[in-house]
Image: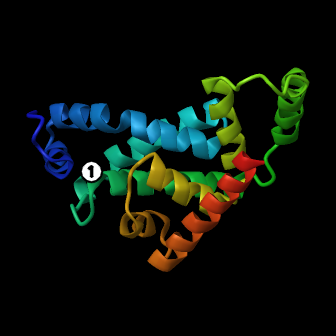
Amino acid sequence: MAEETTDEQLMLAYAQGDMRAFETLYQRHRGMLYRFIFRSANNRATADEMFQETWSRLIAARARYRPEAKFSTYLLQIAQNLIVDSYRRNRPQAGVEETEEIMRTLDAPESEQPERVLSEFEQRRGLQRVLEDLPAEQRSAFLLRIESGLGLEEIARVTGAGQETVKSRLRYALAKIRERIGA
């Protein structure tokens, strides 16, 4: 498949049986999709399972696909629905407190060295912790904007919320992130 072929054209070709079209779609979107799911799930095993299930559902729905929105929006909407279902099934999540306790233990020596500059890994982990503390709706909106580059209208489609609600969720998420990172 040529690089200039749109995702929507590729999905329609795949619906007609073109396996190369699916392979191209998978190559284009696997990294973005996995990052979104992983940061939403906060658990590699769960993220792996949801990643596979997202692609399975896409495959199962290929004949019903209509290019009414960007393909990435369609794909992320499938993933978002799986994430929401997972939150509903797993409230409250087991192991979160244990993980935080381990992280506090690991962070103790660093807090004794305030002059030490945080490494890139530590900064990413700090951001991940802030994201984990955000309400699910704010975290999803933030990740869809930052990780996937979606606009307000596309995020609204993926999450099923109004654009003003999405804008509000993003504003609150950014305020909480700035507050926690600045602290």
Residue extending farthest to the front is: 115
> Within the image, what quadrant is residue 142 found in?
bottom right
Is residue 13 positioned above or below 171 on the image? Answer: above
Q: Residue at x 45, y 76 (%)?
A: 163
Is 121 or 1 nearer to us in this picture? 121
Label 1, secondary structure: give it: helix
Q: Residue at x 65, y 58 (%)?
A: 136
Measured from the top left, where is residue 160 in percent x and y?
48, 71
Q: Is residue 170 left or right of residue 181?
A: left
Indicate the amino acid at tag 1. Arg
The quadrant in which the N terminus is found is: top left
Measured from the top left, where is residue 58 in percent x and y?
35, 47
Query: What is the total number of numbered labels drawn onto the structure image?
Result: 1
**Looking at the image, what colour scheme do you see?**
rainbow
Q: Is residue 83 left or right of residue 53?
A: right
Is residue 160 positioned above or below 30 on the image? Answer: below
> Within the image, what quadrant is residue 89 found in?
bottom right
Q: Is residue 20 left or right of residue 175?
A: left
Q: Is residue 98 left or right of residue 173?
A: right
Query: Badge 1 local density, few (<14 within 10 Å), some, or many (20+)?
Result: some
Is residue 163 positioned above or below 112 on the image? Answer: below
Measured from the top left, where is residue 93 in percent x and y?
79, 47
Measured from the top left, where is residue 12 in percent x and y?
16, 50
Q: Which residue is mark 1?
A: 62
Is 180 or 143 nearer to us in this picture? 180
Is residue 137 positioned above or below 27 on the image? Answer: below
Q: Residue at x 77, y 22 (%)?
A: 116
